[in-house]
Amino acid sequence: MIRFEEVYKFYNDTAVVEDFSLEINEGEFFVLIGPSGSGKTTTLKMINQLIHLTEGTILIDDKRISDYDLQELRWNIGYVLQQIALFPNMTVEENITIVPEMKKWSKEDMHDRVTELLDTVGLDPDKYRNRQISELSGGEQQRIGVIRALAADPDIILMDEPFSALDPISRSRLQKDVVELQHKLKKTVVFVTHDMQEAINLGDRICVMNQGRIEQVGTAEEILKHPANDFVKEFLQTGLPHYQEEKTVQHLIDNDYITRTSDAPSTASIEADAPVNDLLLLMADHSTVKVTHADQEDCMVTRDHLVHYLASQVNTDKEASAS
Ligand code: ADP
Ligand code: MG
């Protein structure tokens, strides 16, 4: 439903988004992640034309964004920012109904909408609707920011690091709220973060960006199991304290846990690119297993090899938790 076709953004002669092509599906929770300066905000703002792309095309429902009436486009795209852009001296209700007001909803519809939205994020409507924004905590304000973006029932919601200024408790509370809301309402959400754990918690798919380019797009599982390159691997390692690449049987061979012998008897075999866990399962029933490899000589693993390898992992885990 949102399609980027070879999109570039230049400032002077510098590309800050480069050759960006991908499709975000209807109802998808799509996360853009990358280090600071990698072009996430620029990419997000090009969708609602707060920033104009330099080259390429962005389409929403197969129509170029430049062919939409700008006001219609913005009204149909909710936007939530890190720095809470609420009006501090207006009430909760007044803040939430800004776009419905512009769309000339009736007083009654707006009142009902505010009740419904406050309920969905666990704020008592009677207690909160007439409060000033300045009387709310940071977490409460950010919840209002989220439901304000939903107020006029847009199809798309853009969120730019909406929770990064919050304490960990408010943050995980709001992450849960947003996931629930999205499952219920089936909105298309494009969510920017630099926090890998948050990306994994929230995203149906994740796009890893670096220096304006896409490094990898996939589900959390795909990215964790098969990081596309060294950049993604390093990003995972720094962002997730307990991240470990899925080890393959080949990893055991490369690190000399398996000695190349070819004369032991074997009744079972496994391919070198299989996960170590598959080998473990196989070795529950077989004391030796043949490892096959397309380009290398076959070799044998014994239970001794595997135990040796597993023991080395116990030591690494101890070191990791001690540091
Ligand atoms: P992110 O959100 O991933 O931190 P941004 O999209 O905000 O990154 O910025 C990407 C790059 O574009 C950065 O190097 C930033 O300095 C640069 N940039 C952003 N806005 C402008 C601008 N108005 N003029 C020149 N460079 C800009
Ligand atoms: Mg940013």
Image: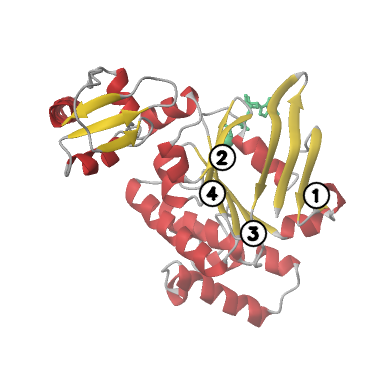
Looking at the rendered image, the disc whose residue lies closer to the viewer, 3 or 1, is: 3
Residue 8, image quadrant: top right
Question: By what rule are the colours in the image chosen?
Answer: secondary structure
Asked if residue 309 lies left or right of residue 38, the reply is left
Residue 144 at x, y percent in the picture:
51, 60
Query: Dots 2 and 4: beta carbons under 8 Å?
Result: no
Determine which residue is flagged by label 3: 26
SS at mark 3 in the image: loop
Q: Is residue 228 above or below residue 162?
A: above
- Would you call the spot at circle 4 few (<14 residues within 10 Å), some (14-19), or many (20 or more)? some
Q: Which residue is mark 1?
A: 65
Q: Position of residue 87 (x, y in %)?
A: 59, 55
Distance from the alpha carbon under mark 4 to that under mark 3: 27 Å
State the quadrant of the N terminus. Answer: bottom right
Q: Which quadrant of the figure contains the C terminus?
A: top left
Packing grade of label 3 (10 A; few <14, some 14-19, many >=20) is: some
Foreground residue, 218 or 77? 218
Gap between marks 2 and 4 measured at Cα:
29 Å
Q: Is residue 50 visible in the rendered structure shown here?
A: no
Q: Give the number of the mark in front: 1 or 2.
A: 2
Mark 3 or mark 1, earlier in chain: 3
Give the number of the disc on residue 217: 2
Q: Nearer the viewer, mark 1 or mark 4?
A: 1
Element carrying mark 1: helix
Using the image as rendered, state which of residue 137 and residue 296 is in the foreground: 296
Write the residue at 23% across / 33% down: 289
Q: Quadrant of residue 52?
A: top right
Which label's residue is closer to the chain start, 1 or 4? Answer: 1
Return the residue at label 4. 84
Q: Amino acid at mark 4?
A: Ile
